[in-house]
Amino acid sequence: METENKNIYGVLAEFRNPKELIDAAETVKESGYSDFDTYAPFPIHGMEKAMGLKESPLGWIVLAGGLTGMIGILTLMIWIMGYDYPLNISGKPYINLPIYVPITFELTVLLSAFAATFGMFALNKLPRFHNPLFNVERFKKASDDGFFIHIESSDDLFSEEQASKLFTDSGAIHVETVYDSD
Amino acid sequence: MSTDYQYVPEPKLVKGDHTFGSITDLIAKTPLSATPPLWYLAFGVANLLLVALLGSVGYLIWDGIGIWGLNNPAGWGWAIINFVWWVGIGHAGTLISAILFLFRQGWRTAINRFAEAMTIFAVMCAGLFPAIHVGRIWVIYWVFPIPNQMGAWPNFSSPLLWDVFAVSTYFTVSLLFWYVGLVPDFATLRDKAKGKIAKMTYGIAALGWTGSFRNWWNYEKAYMILAGLATPLVLSVHTIVSFDFAVSLIPGWHSTIFPPYFVAGAIYSGFAMVLTLMLIARKIYGLEDIMNIDIMEKMNLVMMVTGNLVAFAYLCEGFIAWYSGYIYEQGIFWLYAVGPYAWGFWILMFCNVVTPQFLWSRSIRRSVTLTFIISIIVNIGMWFERFMIAVASLSTDFLPSSWDYYSPTFWDIIIYLGTFGLFFTFFLLFLRFMPMVAIAEVKGVLPQADPHNYDEKTNDFIAPNAEPQQQSVQQKNQ
């Protein structure tokens, strides 16, 4: 494919270590960019402050999942045991809340866990079939020992030269422009 | 009084001189290199046992559970013993991955993936037993609240039904937790793999994970929530398993100590199983730097504490039998010690009460051979504990005229051995094709991962003084 048909996806820079990545992220944030992200083989503590991230909304998703499980199974058990199919067991009351505790607990946990797992994947927009970053050979290091930062072309302030200059000035060991296709 | 305090740093979690790259290579090389011949041998043996299991389960379904040694007083035999034993083993995995995570124990990263895999395969083995014990496995779906043509529903007040919900939830949540942990490591394998098929498979499993911090941010939250959910869950599972016994009126079963006692026993046997597997795997796969002696010692300490909790529970059972003044409870306890199954009781006492006491010694805790032997003994002991609870209590119940001696048949034994085939088939596949140590998590506990360990000006790594001084190390080792 010819060069002029390629769309620029953003500018990717590699840094030496977690400390430099955090410092670079702080610089990028303070320069006013918002569509940027850092990539590392493990979560770096303190990065959320450097990047200015808000608290993840996942907790609310899990709460919704847990409440669905809890209310759903309690309703089902009360309806079955109290009205649809009452069983007389040693003369105990049909609607007997203490004996519903174990199953209610299990279902609350089960639906919360589903909400936590799939909620997390949804918030992260995964699974994702293709990511232009994978066009960069060097980016393979992001899951091994590379520390990357990427400014997306969708950012209002984005210009290839300025972003590259910003990275070079903050001490990047490698700066590269990422294209949408190979 | 001296005020000369000295800072004693924690020992390094990962031994040797490792960088992020060398950790990746160390762990990713096993799934990405050729299969060792020894693996085929082990896999072949496991497959033979698995075939034996499938064959005998097939015969059991064909002929009915009469092929087992169950008799009139002892309606619960090896099937229930094996069920409780396998579920108990599974508990260590969740303890390591969830509870130790909440307590911020960095050493769990060396073994959590491994132990979680063990949990999942152990719960699979466990779940088989109640399923085939119902006799008519083709209507096993009756245990779930599914609308049906009979207009009937399961009885939600039965602890056996609670068990269905507890074990199936436990299996599902463990699997989700395991997979969430695996995603970043699948991404590492995807990026390291050379072959097309390996690249594709790991790529699909990694779901397009990039290591983006915006993703890590949600990921860490999810991981913490899952750990928070799994913690009460694991305690609830063995509690509910113990309700199967404790809610009945059989002497020796009807006891409020059962839930904590079962949970402690589960963690005790689970840690023993993790140690057994870990000590073999670290040797074969050369992971001594990660699964090191310090971690083995910490696990031995957990085993010592839970082993003594179990021993204390035995003591309490004996005391309460005497103190309650209830002759049937006293009778069953007396029958444990001198009755027809006294041999089982004394094996149990040796394995579970005497053995953990050796762990008070630091040199035994740090000896690989002795730890391996102790871990095997503990697993045997915990099997006999369930044997005594299930069989001895049932076969010598209220009426001496109905007493009968329980012994297993060939089919009991072959199905139990067969579950090892099931377990090891999956476990060997796991060792072969998956990262057996959580790569991202181990990197996260390296000192290089902490931005504070870098020089403010030059941005160069400064190793924190993590290892005790050379001299004091030598003193400790002596």
Image: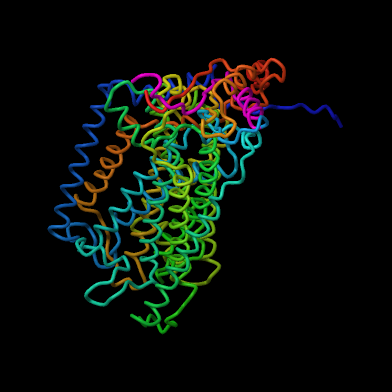
- In the rendered image, the residue lying farthest to the bottom is A91
Q: Position of residue B332 (x, y in %)?
A: 42, 64
Residue B270 lies left or right of residue B143; in this view the side is right
Q: Which residues are magenta?
A: A1-29
Q: Quadrant of residue B329?
A: bottom left
Quadrant hosting residue B395: bottom left
Front residue (pair B255, B470)? B470
Q: Is residue B91 above or below residue A149?
A: below
- Residue at the far front: name it: A4
Q: Is residue B25 visible?
A: yes
Nearer to me, B203 or B473: B203
Task: Estimate the x, y position of residue B353 in percent, counting from the top left.
Answer: 49, 46
Across and down, in percent, residue B315 comes to 53, 56
* Residue A149 vs residue B32, the one in the foreground: A149
Identify the colour scheme used. rainbow
Q: Which residue shows up at 29% across the image and 63% down it? A: B74
Residue A4: horizontal and vertical position, in percent? 40, 21
| Farthest right residue in view | B1
Asked if the stretch drawn in magenta spans residue A19, the answer is yes
Q: Is residue A112 left or right of residue B459?
A: left
Q: How many marks?
A: 0
Q: Is residue B358 visible?
A: no
As for residue B84 lying within the magenta part, the answer is: no
Quadrant in the rendering for residue B250: bottom left
Question: Could you tell me which residue is drawn at 33 percent across and 51 percent down?
Answer: B126
Image quadrant occupied by the C terminus of chain B: top right
Rendered residue at 32%/27% (across/down): B199
Q: Residue at x 30, y 41 (%)?
A: B423
